[in-house]
Amino acid sequence: MSADPHNAADPAFTFAFQPIVDTVAREVVGWEALIRGTWDEPAWQVLNQVSPLRLHLFDQNARAAAVGLAGRLGIDGALHLNFMPRSLDSYPKSVLTTIEAALAAGLSPDRIVLEVREAEVIEDRTHFAALMRDVRARGIQLAIDNFGATYASLTILDDLEPDQIKLDMRLIRSADRSGARQAILRAIRRACY
């Protein structure tokens, strides 16, 4: 599938749906739609083929495509979708497009979890937080993806008040052998409650 049928320069792509498991209940509670090339290329290879001028439109269209595919596959539980914060700058109705795609696919918007990618700087956090409050008022949940990896700081927890955070794997890898990482993880946990 192509992100935009009007631009053949966009790469063809599909999705891998990675299960999100509640380890206490031992059940799948959701799925993260991970963009992949048609030959299973990782997301970064697909995204590197997209013109920087079209990246945020591609982001918007890819979310809609993921929701449509999830609906056709009958995926249950929450559907986690990556979201580039700057998409709202170029395409203010970007999230509405995701909601419309969910409704068309027979999915309730309250099953959607937008994972804000921290790989992009959020220039105006106050404005972005206001936009995210509007998104959450429509029933969509908000998560911070790869928390602790790049641009996000602890203040983003206060600014966005996300429903979930997904810690960057570098924070948790070998945490059992690192007192410093354990202290960081305890502090993040305290900040979230």
Image (spheres, grey):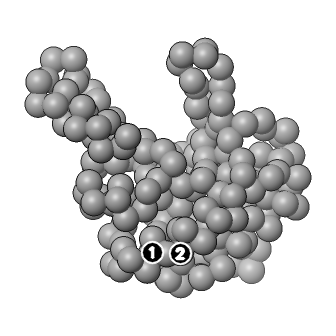
Nearer to me, 144 or 68: 144
Position of residue 130 relative to residue 79, above or below, is: below
Quadrant of image for the N terminus: bottom right
Question: Which residue is found at the position 60% from the left and 71% from the top?
Answer: 134
10 Å neighbourhood of mark 2: few (<14), some, or many (≥20)?
Answer: some
Which label is found at residue 128? Answer: 1
Q: Quadrant of residue 117?
A: bottom left
* Residue bearing mark 2: 131
Residues tagged 2 and 1 counted as in contact (Cβ below 8 A): yes
Callout 1, which amino acid?
A: Phe
Quick check: can you spot residue 14? no
Q: Position of residue 116 (x, y in %)?
A: 47, 58
CA gap between label 2 and label 1 equals: 5 Å
10 Å neighbourhood of mark 1: few (<14), some, or many (≥20)?
Answer: some
Q: Position of residue 25 (x, y in %)?
A: 60, 16
Position of residue 91 relative to residue 75, above or below, is: below
Quick check: can you spot residue 179? yes
